[in-house]
Structure formats: C-alpha cells, structure tokens
Image: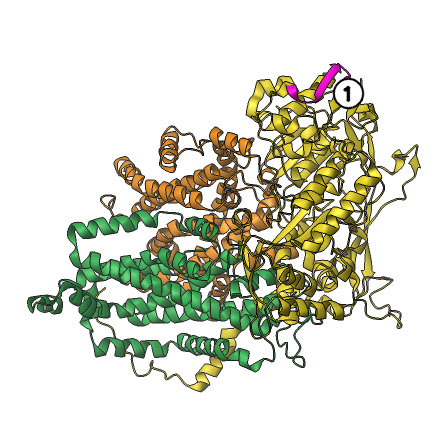
Chain colours: A green, B orange, C yellow
C-alpha cells in the first residue's frame, strides 16, 4: 500500500545520467516534453478532469444548501435526492454527503499536497547537499537514507499516530517525513552528475557560494523529475491517509477525508451504497488522474521514447 | 555470494539499531502504560507489576536491558497476552503472515506478469486498454473496500467461501484474504511488466529474432521475458513491505491471526514488548527479503556482480 | 540509450482538442463507473427498491421440556456452539483476568460458590447451600461433595479459600481486589498491609468455608460468581506459575475445560467430563472467536460461521430488523452511558448552571431513537433501571426536569446558560473527548449538534485512542467533557453510586462532596435493606443535583442468536453459561420477504395495501 508506481520511476530516474536532460537544456527540453505530453491524450484528459475535481472541491459546497456538519434528524441515511438538495444522499448521522465528499476532498488533496511538499523540501535539500559535496559526506548521508529505507515505515507511522493522537498536521509530517527518502535519492543522483557540468564549474570559478550554486543552478534543473515525482507521490499519500482512516487514526470529526468517508461507506455498503459509491468514485478518479498524468510526464521527460 | 550475503546482513545492524531505538522510545512516550485500566489499580499492585517488568527503572536502563535481552534472543513476556511470551506469539503469528503474504506475492507476480506481457504484446489494442484501465482501477481502490465486497459476494451471497477466520490455514480460508491482499500488486506488476516488456520487444535483438521468423510466443518466452522481468524483480522488495503493511487491513477484516494484528493491538494496548518484537522481526524480514531480491537480480542479470553497496 | 529525443513527427503530433477529449471521456470514466456499478450490484442496490427478496430462514422444531430438560429427540447430533466474543482476552487466569470477554469464557471454565440460573437468579453451584448469620456478617458455605476438577481431583473448601487469597494477594496483581472489599481485611490484605492469613476467609474442614464480612453487603452472594472469587487448583499453580492458564496447564472446575487457545483466532473449550453435573450438559464444544470488528462479526454470523454474536453494528438496525428480525435479541443491561464534566478546571469548575444547561440541552429521546436505535433507554439518573437493591428493584432517582416537556427543558437550559455568562454572541467553546469507536463518535456528533442548536455552544470533538483517553481522563488536566460508561460487575446500585466517591479510581470528574461520601459510608454499614435503599436514593438525588456527570442512556445487550441455540435466558447482567444450552435440530428453507420484512408467498405477491411505512 505504501509503495506505488514510484519505486520503479525512482530507480530509473536515480540512475539516469543528468547529461541527457542537460543535452536539451533550457527551452528545447520543456518544449519537447510539452510536445510529447500533448500527444498523450490520456494525460491531458486526466489533467482536465483533475482540474475539474479540484474546482468542484473548492467551489462545490457553495452550490449546496447544506453545511458539512449539520445533522438533519429527519433525513438520516437517505439515498441521493436532488429535490432535498442531498445530491449524494446523507450519511448515518443525517449529514449531507455531497458537501462532506467535497470537504473530504479538500482534506485528502491537502494532505497529499502538503505531505508531498514536506518531502520535497527535505528531499531536495538533503539530496542536493549529498550530491553536491560528494565523497564522505555523500557516503554518510546516503548511508542514513539506506538505513531509514529499510525501516517498516508504516508501522512507525502507526506508532506515531498512536503516541501523539490524530492531528492533521502530524499526518502531513509523518507521511512527508517518510516519503522524502525517494526524493533524496533521485536528487542526489542528478546532482552528482550535474556537479561536474560546465555551467556549475563556471559558477564555482566565478566565486558563487555553495548554497547559491545548489539552489540557483542545480535545483532548478531538477524540476522535471520533481514534477513526475510529485504527481506520483500525491496519490500515494492519499492512499496512506485512507489506510490510517481505516485503522481509526485519521482526521477528527466532524472533519473528514475521502479515506474516512470510503471507510464509513464500506461498512454501510449494504444499507447505504451511496455512502460508499460517491466518495469512492471521487477517490478513484483522482488517483486515476494523478497516475495517468505522472505516467504521461514521465514518458514526456524520458528521452527513451516509449 | 555467501560473503556478500553475510556482509549485507552485517550492514543491516545499524538499520535494526535505529529501528529498535526509534520504536522503543516512541512507544514508551505514548500516554498510558500497559497496566492502565479504567479502574485504577491500587498503587501497591501497580508498583508490584511495574517492578516485575522492570518498568520502574529509568528509561535508559530499560533500553540497555532490552538490547541485552534481544542479543540473547529474549523478547520478553507479552504485557497484553499475559499467558504468552513475545517469542511464542511471533512464532504463531509469523507462519500465518508468511502464508498470507507469500501467497499474495506469488499470485501477484504470476498474474501480474502474465497480464502485463499480454498487454505488451497486444500493445494499443483493446485488450491492452482494457487490462491497463482495470489495473489502474485496482490501484485506485483501497483494499478495505475490495475485501468486504469479496466477502459479500463469495461468502454471503454465494456461500462458497468462509467470511473470515483462519482455521489453521485451511485453503478455503485462504482464498479471499489472499485475493484481497494481492489485487493491488497484481495491478501494479501488470503495469510495470507491460512497460518493460514493450521496451524489450523494441530492442534490436528481439527484432532480429522476429526477423529470423521465430513466432511471437517463442520470442517472448525465450528471449524477452527474462530481461523484461528485471523491473518486476526490483519491485519485489517494496511490494513485500507493502504487502506486510496491507495485511494489517486484511487481517483485521478477515480475522486472520497474523503479525499485523498483533502489532496494531499491541500498539493500542501499550504492549511494549510485543510491539518491539513485531517491529524488529519485520525489520529483519525486510532486510532478508531485500537481500534475496538482490541475489535474484544478480542471477537474472549476469552484468550485475554482487558487491559493494553494503 | 542516450540518443537525443526525437522530435515528434508531424503526423504523430495530434493536437489536443475538445473533440478528442470528449471522445476519450467514455474510456476514461468507464472503468471507475464499472467498478462502482459492481459495488452497486454486489451490495444489492436492487434490493433497496420495494421488490420482495428471497432469504434463507432456519427452521427448528418446537422444544418440549421434560423435567426442565429438552426432549432428546429435538437435539442436534453435533452439539457445538460458536460464539463471537469481542476482543481477545488478555489471560484466562481467573484472578488476573479482566473485562467482559474473559469473564464470558471463565464462566464456562470455572464455577464459583454460587451460580446463576439463565434468568439471573442466584443458585447453588460450588456450594450446595449456605447459612448467613443474623447480622449479615458471617457466611458459612457447604461445599458440594461431588465437585471435581478437570483432572478428577475433588474440589474442596481449601481450594476456594486458596482462590480468594490468591486473588487478593498483592503478588498476583488482580484488578478486582476492590470489589472484594466487603470481606474482612480484604483491602488491607490487597494493599500488603496485612498478611494473607488475616483475611476473613477460612476453610473449617474440607467441605465447609466461612467468610466473614466487614460490612453487610446484600449483594455478596452475587459477587461469588465473579471470576475473582473462583477456586484455583493449587498444585497446578505451583507447578506452572505464570503459565498456569495455558491449554494443557489449566485445571478448571466448571463444565468445560480449555482445549485450544490461538491468540486472535479462537479459544476452544471441551466438556469437562469430571464436572459434577456433566450428565445434564449438552454442548460438547464451545468455540469463542475474538472478533472486535462488528461488521466482520455480522458477516461471519450471516455466513453461518458463528451462532451467537457479541454485538451488532449500531447503524445497521433497520437492515437487521428487516432481514434478521427474529434472530435479534435485545435485553436491558446493567450499564450506564454518560458524559462526565471535569470539575477541577474551568469552564465546569464551580459552574453548576453551565453543567445543568448542557445536561438539559441534550434530547435523549432523539439520541436513543435515532442514533443508538436498539432500544436503549434515555437516562437522566445514574443508576440504570432494573438493578436489584436487596429490597426489590431499585428506582433510579430522575431529576425533576427529566419529565418536563422538551420546550421547557430547552427554555431552562437557555436560561441557565445565560445565567452562567454565555450567549449566542459569546458562546461556550468546549472540548468533548471520546475514545475511538463508531458508536461513541456518533453520540458525540449528535450531542455536539444538540448543544449547538439549543445553545450555540461550539464543541470541538476530540477522538482519542483508549489508553491516551484514559490517561487524560485520570490526569484531569486537559479534559472538559468526556465520555464514560460503566457496566457493573455486580447487581447493586452501589456499584454505580460508589463511582463518584471522592476517592474512587473512576471518579474522573473529580467530584468531591463530603456529604455524599458520608452517605456512602452510611450505606455500606446499614444492615437493613429498606433503609439502605432509601439512603442510596438520597445519595443519588444529592449527587445528581450537583450534576458532576450527565447520564445519557442505559445500555442494552443486543446480539444475534441463531434460532437453533436453545436454553438461552435473559438477565440484566448478561451472564450466560453454555452448560445450560443445547443445539436444536434444524434445517434451512428459503422464504420471500417484502420490503418491511414480512413473509410473502411469492415474489409477486402484492402486499396488504393498508400497510403503512414502518419507521
């Protein structure tokens, strides 16, 4: 459940020499990538659908007469009904599922995004430093990554949730702190090869500071990989969150997430199928889209023309 | 190879030490202790119990005591299941988890590789699209949705298979949990396999083989399969880790007495020793499994020689 | 490998247009839709319409009792009972065990001095008879001569003495020493202040046991079927030590003996053929399954894998009522579900008005009618109905406002809320803590909604995992309102009233009223049952006027029992003994049910037109 598409991508990207990317540095790299991506209709369609989901999640609740936490005592667990404004029906506590699904989407997407960003910041910094300094520093830093990599991390996340209680920021941090390892590996591999390119050496000769070289010259060149990584990490995080929700370690009521809704729905699937179907549909479509976009981006950026 | 294996296993010691340290202190800073119950125990009895399990000592002392015990292979008594030692519990839970996880992984590889190969050979046909979108669906639906659906259908509607329980690993009791656990990995391996197979099929030597007039199934089986399997093999490590985690869900839904449930119950009940025991055990398992995968990788790909990497 | 990227050939570069997007759309959404459709079909979306559905029903013969025993002709060949039993018991050592799941099993394994009939009356068991002294302080038990341990050795008065002393020995670490405190010197012995010999329990000879009490306790006989009082086989304790409760080690004196124990899988008991009443026992094997997850339990029940569930999922009431209505058993239970206020910190410290306002603002009828649904009764008093007090059934002391019309309750709640200094513009912000569970979550959501609606209170729900929750409750530092519930170990109002004694371990409200404590002391010393009852009622009224807690509802036992399980009685303690049960011959037949769960002869049988919607 924790390991996804990414593993193979990570491996491929970490081993891919940076010259390839540099060979078409600048305009042409992005231009070509974009041209390739445009051909991938599935990826573009996914991007559009994802955009629609995001827009709906943000503005959708405005189009409902109901609030996400108001109980309608007379309408508990009723099927979808447009007339009453319960477009997706209500849950067992008489709360509107349309609004709850969209609010849950906000949380799920937010968890996905923030945890990914956390991992990006840690991973890029860590990987860039290791790759840039190389030698013993690199060996030591990567050894640490190797050690952490072999930990049964989901188990530690469960422990963490048990210890500190369910707190949404903690969910971000815990998941983010786990997935940064992949990022660190990729970035380090890229940096190692970028390190000895002409422009970095030129910048060094001109007396630029190391931090400046890392963040002005090396990090921007990693954007392509980062983009692929992000699109493949977000769905993974969303699934991890749903796993925690299943164990009862998710967000606090009355707030919710797709994972929590799907879990509740799965328990009531026979008596109230709608409470499973709608959140599951949103969850599946979102994960679909992220994965297709990720695949598309990877193919577009990967010169090994598949 | 033995030299390499031993080196790798020794190299895992720091990993395990970090693991032990993190989980030891994490579970102990958790609020509440193993003997806290709703009714407060009389202080004398509480003190008695704590003394019995050395919980009254300073944390660092307990830590070193624990390390010492582990080196001697003693995981201590379980605080929660008072009639058992942690070693006994793991000895009972592990075969269950191994059966469940092993079969799920095997199924995932067999079906995943087959489907992926078929999709690759028929690239861009409707077969390919159908298989790949199904696979994507498999990846996008959490297994706590799939599992109850399987139970409803096969156990309750059709009444063909049991809805839960383990029954000593009787094969009828295995089918649903193994299936529910492996679906995700079937889907993912199929995608992975398709990608790598397409790449291999485009390579020059396969084209040459085809040009020589060899039939497609023959080419695939004799020449393409082995190189195309490489990404799948390197995915096995993470897949195994994922299956161990995923089995927490499956064990709970199907009432399977495996390590995942021990862990979750142990964590919730502050069974310090049981939690530590399971975490360490699984940590070792992952290390060993990754080693096996690497050896397998080397066997499949003669270009790679086992060395270094540590 | 490193060849530069190929520029897309113009013919390949197809532009992304709206048309191509729309063409792709069906491909794109078809699979998630297909998946969802599968869910819909599998979950029987179709059955949510009014078409009759076919279900299997179990048919059993009518039972004739001959001398109180079932006619052997109706008994099934296989006498195997399979029970869902909640969580995995921590241990089956009767003196170390705690919690309902282990008590259920121990009741089959061991036999105390007294036992219970299926309908909950105290009956002779390990002791054939007993004498109680005039002052109610000395009990003399005449131990049954034909009692046998599962290894065949006789059960003696010394075994009972050893059991009680082992239970109270501080080295054992029993969690139930507190309930034995009526026994003379029990508290001091449990604390290690007095030696075991000082305990008021003595075997006068092999078959006579004398127990001396410090205070009269009308419920004492009922206590003697609690696991902490069970006898213990001394030789095996000495042989096995801490490992005495394992299969193969445990020697028991009840109708069954421990055969297999697989943690998180099952516990299997088999007949103890040495048991004195073995001839009248029917069930040969009892399987206890630890299944915490109620929906999993329900599925396994429906698949025919268990005969008796521990619970049923709360939110499935309508479904269960419709399809399994005849197998659903609901009985009152000796338990109270309540919310506590932390009286040691603001906002509830010295703020009776606010506590009363919050207590009144909750509509308990809606809570039990729409949220818990299974016939739980709204509670305003702390002692649940149906408890026996030694002088008949105890009447819980509802506060006067309990019987007011809802409008009046709300008006008074608002008045008190404002008098406490809060208003719509200056609302109370309060934290409500509960431990992880679907039911607790729903109650908390409902209560928070009621407070918001009635008073405008802003409630923050905090769901904590059990151990964290307990630790916070006990420390009384961060808690404000917290969930609590109590299911009594013995049938007496004091088992509830004592919870709010200032020194009681479970008084997590921090309620400290010397007058109340003094009353409890008087109750403990009062030998007269009538007077004792009056004192208890006085105490309950006094405490409720202070509103340190807010009772919500009294528990019910709710479970599914297959129709072929015979001999099952109902009692307020929910204590059951498998030895009293039997499995009936049975077969299944298919019947059609209409949308209200009534039987119809064929799928197209039209229903009675006058039948209205059932709620």
Coordinates of residue B192 in the picture (x, y in percent): 39, 60
Question: Please, is residue C190 above or below residue C299 in the view?
Answer: above
Q: Residue furthest left?
A: A205
Observer-nearest of A148 and B133: A148
Q: Chain of mark 1?
A: C
Q: Position of residue A225 (x, y in %)?
A: 29, 67
Residue at horizontal 55 percent and vertical 71 percent from the top = A101
Quarter of the N terminus of chain C within the rendering: bottom left
Q: Nearer the viewer, residue C190 or B261?
A: C190
Query: Which structural element holds mark 1?
Result: loop
Task: Say whether residue B196 is visible.
Answer: yes
Tell me: B151 left or right of A133.
Answer: right
Please name the residue that numbered disc 1 is placed on: C147
Badge 1 crowding class, 10 Å Cα cut-off, few under 14, some 14 to 19, many 20 or more, is: many
Q: Is residue C49 above or below residue A129?
A: below
Q: Which residues are magenta?
A: C198-208
Q: Is residue C306 above or below residue A222?
A: above
Residue C156 seen in the current view: no
The quadrant in which residue C210 appears is top right
Q: Position of residue B187 (x, y in %)?
A: 47, 59
User: Residue at the location (52% across, 68% down)?
Assistant: A104
Apparent side of residue A264 relative to residue C307 in the rendered image (left or right): left
Between residue C365 and residue C329, name the one nearer to us: C365
Residue B149 is inside the magenta segment: no
Q: Quadrant of the C terminus of chain C?
A: bottom right
């Amino acid at each position: 459940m924790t390991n996804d598409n990414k593993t193979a991508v990570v491996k491929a990207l970490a081993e891919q020499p940076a010259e390839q990317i540099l060979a078409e540095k600048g305009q042409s790299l992005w231009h070509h990538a974009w041209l390739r991506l445009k051909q991938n209709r599935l990826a573009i369609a996914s991007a559009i659908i994802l955009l629609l989901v995001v827009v709906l999640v943000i503005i959708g609740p405005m189009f409902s007469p109901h609030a996400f936490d108001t109980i309608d005592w007379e309408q508990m667990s009723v099927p979808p009904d447009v007339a009453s404004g319960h477009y997706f029906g209500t849950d067992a506590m008489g709360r509107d599922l349309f609004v709850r699904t969209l609010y849950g989407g906000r949380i799920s997407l937010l968890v996905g995004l923030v945890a990914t960003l956390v991992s990006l910041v840690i991973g890029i910094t860590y990987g860039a430093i290791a790759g840039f300094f190389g030698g013993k520093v690199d060996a030591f830093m990567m050894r640490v990554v190797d050690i952490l990599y072999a930990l049964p991390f989901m188990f530690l996340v469960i422990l963490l949730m048990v210890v500190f209680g369910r707190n949404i920021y903690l969910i971000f941090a815990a998941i983010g702190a786990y997935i940064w390892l992949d990022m660190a590996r990729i970035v380090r591999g890229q940096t190692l090869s970028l390190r000895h390119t002409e422009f970095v050496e030129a910048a060094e000769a001109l007396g630029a500071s190391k931090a400046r070289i890392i963040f002005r010259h090396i990090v921007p060149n990693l954007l392509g990989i980062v983009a692929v990584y992000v699109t493949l990490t977000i769905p993974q995080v969303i699934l991890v969150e749903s796993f925690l929700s299943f164990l009862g370690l998710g967000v606090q009521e009355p707030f919710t997430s797709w994972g929590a809704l799907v879990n509740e729905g799965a328990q009531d699937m026979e008596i109230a199928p709608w409470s499973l179907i709608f959140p599951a549909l949103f969850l599946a479509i979102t994960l679909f889209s992220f994965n297709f976009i990720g695949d598309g981006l990877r193919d577009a950026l990967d010169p090994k023309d598949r | 190879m033995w030299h390499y294996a031993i080196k790798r296993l020794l190299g895992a010691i720091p990993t395990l030490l970090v693991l032990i340290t993190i989980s030891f202190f994490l579970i102990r800073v958790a609020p509440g202790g193993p003997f806290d119950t709703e009714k407060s125990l009389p202080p004398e009895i509480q003190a008695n119990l704590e003394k019995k399990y050395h919980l009254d000592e300073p944390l660092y002392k307990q830590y070193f005591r624990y390390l010492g015990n582990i080196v001697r292979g003693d995981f201590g008594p379980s605080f929660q299941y008072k009639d058992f030692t942690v070693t006994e519990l793991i000895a009972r839970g592990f075969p269950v988890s191994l059966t469940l996880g092993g079969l799920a992984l095997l199924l995932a590889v067999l079906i995943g590789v087959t489907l992926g190969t078929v999709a690759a050979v028929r690239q861009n046909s409707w077969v390919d699209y159908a298989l790949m979108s199904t696979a994507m669906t498999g990846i996008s639906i959490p297994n706590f949705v799939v599992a109850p659906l399987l139970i409803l259908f096969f156990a309750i509607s059709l009444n063909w298979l049991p809805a839960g329980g383990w029954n000593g690993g009787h094969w009828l009791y295995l089918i649903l949990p193994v299936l529910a656990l492996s679906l995700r990995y079937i889907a993912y391996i199929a995608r992975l396999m398709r990608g790598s197979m397409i790449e291999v099929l485009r390579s020059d030597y396969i084209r040459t083989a085809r040009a020589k007039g060899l039939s497609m199934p023959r080419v695939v089986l004799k020449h393409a399969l082995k190189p195309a399997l490489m990404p799948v093999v390197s995915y096995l490590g993470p897949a195994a880790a994922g299956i161990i985690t995923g089995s927490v869900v499956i064990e709970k839904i199907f009432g399977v007495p495996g390590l995942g449930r021990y862990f979750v119950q142990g964590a919730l009940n502050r069974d310090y020793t049981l939690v530590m025991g399971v975490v360490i055990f699984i940590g070792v398992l992952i290390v060993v499994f990754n080693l096996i995968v690497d050896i397998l990788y080397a066997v499949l790909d003669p270009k790679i020689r086992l060395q270094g990497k540590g | 490998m490193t060849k530069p990227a190929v520029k897309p050939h113009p013919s390949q570069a197809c532009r992304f247009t709206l048309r191509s997007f729309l063409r792709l759309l069906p491909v794109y959404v078809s699979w998630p839709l297909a998946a969802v459709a599968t869910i819909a079909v599998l979950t029987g979306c179709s059955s949510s319409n009014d078409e009759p559905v076919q279900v299997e029903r179990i048919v059993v013969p009518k039972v004739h009792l001959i001398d109180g025993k079932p006619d052997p002709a109706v008994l099934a060949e296989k006498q195997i009972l399979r029970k869902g039993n909640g969580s995995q018991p921590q241990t089956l050592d009767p003196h170390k065990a705690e919690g309902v799941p282990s008590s259920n099993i121990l009741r089959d394994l061991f036999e105390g001095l007294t036992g219970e009939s299926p309908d909950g009356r105290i009956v002779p068991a390990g002791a054939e008879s007993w004498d109680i002294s005039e002052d109610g302080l000395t009990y003399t038990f005449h131990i049954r001569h034909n009692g046998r341990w599962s290894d065949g050795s006789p059960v003696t008065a010394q075994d009972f003495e050893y059991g009680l002393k082992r239970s109270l020995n501080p080295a054992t670490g029993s969690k139930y020493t507190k309930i034995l405190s009526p026994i003379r010197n029990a508290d001091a012995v449990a604390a290690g202040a007095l030696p075991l010999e000082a305990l008021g329990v003595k075997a006068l000879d092999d078959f006579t046991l004398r127990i001396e009490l410090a205070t009269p306790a009308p419920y004492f006989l009922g206590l003697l079927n609690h696991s902490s009082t069970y006898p213990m086989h001394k030789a095996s304790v000495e042989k096995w030590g801490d490992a005495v409760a394992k299969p193969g080690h445990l020697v028991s004196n009840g109708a069954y003996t421990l055969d297999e124990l697989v943690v998180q899988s099952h516990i299997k008991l088999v007949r103890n053929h040495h048991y004195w009443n073995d001839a009248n026992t029917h069930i040969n094997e009892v399987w206890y399954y630890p299944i915490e997850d109620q929906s999993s339990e329900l599925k396994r029940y429906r698949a025919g894998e268990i005969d008796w569930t521990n619970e049923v999922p709360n939110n499935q009431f309508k479904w269960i009522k419709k399809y399994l209505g005849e197998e659903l058993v609901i009985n009152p239970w000796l338990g109270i579900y309540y919310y506590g206020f932390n009286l040691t910190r603001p906002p509830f410290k010295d703020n009776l008005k606010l506590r009363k306002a919050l207590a009144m603002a909750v509509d308990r009828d809606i809570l039990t009618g729409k949220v818990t649904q299974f016939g739980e009764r709204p509670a305003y008093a702390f002692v649940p109905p149906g408890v026996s007090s030694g002088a008949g059934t105890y009447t819980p002391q509802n506060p006067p406002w309990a019987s007011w019309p809802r409008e009046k309750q709300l008006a008074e709640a608002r008045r008190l809320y404002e008098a406490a200094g809060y208003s719509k513009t200056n609302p109370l912000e309060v934290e409500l803590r509960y431990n992880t569970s679907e039911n607790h979550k729903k109650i908390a959501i409902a209560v928070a909604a009621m407070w918001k609606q009635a008073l405008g209170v802003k409630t923050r729900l905090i769901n904590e995992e059990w151990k964290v929750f307990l630790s916070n409750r006990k420390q009384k530092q961060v808690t404000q309102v917290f969930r609590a519930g109590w299911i009594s170990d013995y049938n007496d109002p004091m088992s509830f009233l004592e919870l709010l004694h200032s020194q009681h371990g479970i008084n997590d409200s921090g309620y400290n009223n010397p007058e109340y404590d003094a009353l409890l002391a008087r109750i403990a010393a009062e030998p007269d049952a009538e007077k004792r009852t009056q004192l208890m009622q006085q105490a309950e009224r006094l405490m409720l006027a202070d509103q340190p807690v807010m009772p919500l509802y009294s528990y019910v036992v709710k479970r599914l029992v297959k129709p072929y399980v015979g001999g099952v009685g109902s009692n307020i303690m929910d204590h059951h003994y498998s030895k009293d049960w039997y499995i009936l011959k049975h077969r299944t037949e298919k019947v059609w049910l209409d949308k209200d769960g009534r039987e119809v002869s064929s799928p197209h049988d039209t229903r009675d037109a006058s039948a209205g919607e059932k709620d």
